[in-house]
Image (cartoon, coloured by chain):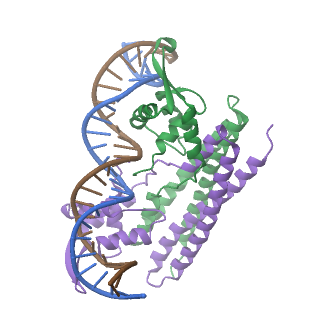
Chain colours: A green, B purple, C brown, D blue
Amino acid sequence: MAKSGTTKFAILGILLAGPQSGYEIAKFCREVISSFWSESYGQIYPKLKELLDEGLIKKKDVAASKRKKSIYTITAKGRKSVEAWAAEPAVSQPVRNELLLKVFFGSELPAEISRQQIQQALAGQQSELGHLKAVEREILAADDLSQRQRRHASMTVRLGVHLMQARIKWAKESLASLDEPSD
Amino acid sequence: MAKSGTTKFAILGILLAGPQSGYEIAKFCREVISSFWSESYGQIYPKLKELLDEGLIKKKDVAASKRKKSIYTITAKGRKSVEAWAAEPAVSQPVRNELLLKVFFGSELPAEISRQQIQQALAGQQSELGHLKAVEREILAADDLSQRQRRHASMTVRLGVHLMQARIKWAKESLASLDEPSD
DNA sequence: AATTGCATGTAAGGAGTTACATGATTAA
DNA sequence: TTAATCATGTAACTCCTTACATGCAATT
């Protein structure tokens, strides 16, 4: 995936909510925004160095509770930079859906293959939907977040919910279509 | 994106429908399956060489209408290989949704930013939905396809339709949510 | 005559993950 | 004491796109 450069802005955006260490940024990606974004250590640490060189963040070494760590804070320049990025129309990166690839090729393969794929997908989707709804409830009850933070966080989960419901609808419709007799 | 290796099977899968040249495979990706899969020349040509070495496809040089080209045909071994891959549960690769990232960070940014993002997204989604429905009609009317091919191709487009409708629903719901007064 | 499409490839470089390496602290 | 979590980073490797390079054929 060449030339997107979104990692930089993802880190800056996370720092908007407050100063954090590289480790905490990674944790945030894993625990909070993983349903629509991912970053790994191999990306985060080198990127923090770059952002520092560009003056978009600043570093402070802290001996927090005996363990030393580096806390990064977004600068005014960094804030301007992430705001400009956020205002630009979002570009949707090329989709690659392995399930659809398998279903598409299914017309040239034994009929059970597509049916099983879709049944498995449906099971996963239903459990995923339950998970997303639980996350939604958590967000609405989180008293460590501001009202605006709750609202925006819940919007992101709501898309997940809508998409999952759509996938479930599709899976059921597709299984029915596979049951229809051939002409 | 490390260690997926799906390109190999994508090419094999495309060859299931009949022998084709590298150029035709690329064209097929661009024109037929682009809504859920993409491959570029830089991937296809080197991969064809690998598949040849592994005995999963065979090559025949043809002087079709004065212009020379290489036509690749899937072998029995290749067919077995793609069938085994198709039967394995589809793995969903990590999602990266730039729009949601911007919406999420929107709680720390001027309020107009998220509203504009979602409005722009909605406009794009509505036009995209119209396009998908046109493609669906084309598939159902395509008499160069078998009934099974039409059925499986239409299933892939139907997921696109369902997902796009979900995105539109979400965008409208989110705009309404942004209009609600704060507590 | 010029543009578009057919046709095959390579090179450079960015993006991204995983595994490795190291070590302290804390909870079971 | 053993495992998990905190903490920072690097190296190797894969994946993938874009641009480049080349040249013929058909259409406008």
For the point 59% across and 53% down, the residue is A164
Q: Is residue A136 above or below residue B144?
A: above
Front in this rendered view, residue B85 or A18: A18
Which residue is at a point 69% across and 50% down the rendered structure image? Answer: B115
Viewed as shown, does residue B34 lie left or right of A146? left
The spot of residue A65 in percent (x, y) is: 51, 12
Give left or right: position of A47 versus C20.
right
- Please state which of residues D22 and B76 is positioned toward the viewer in this rendering: D22
Q: Whole-percent x and y of residue B140?
A: 53, 79
Residue at horizontal 55 percent and vertical 40 percent from the top: A81
Nearest the viewer among A83 and B45 is A83
Tell whether D12 sits left or right of A109. Answer: left
Q: Quadrant of the C terminus of chain B?
A: top right
Q: Is residue D19 above or below residue D5?
A: below
Q: Position of residue A76 (x, y in %)?
A: 58, 32
Residue B134 appears in the picture as rendered? yes
Say if residue A130 shows up in the picture.
Answer: no
Position of B2 relative to B51 (above/below): above
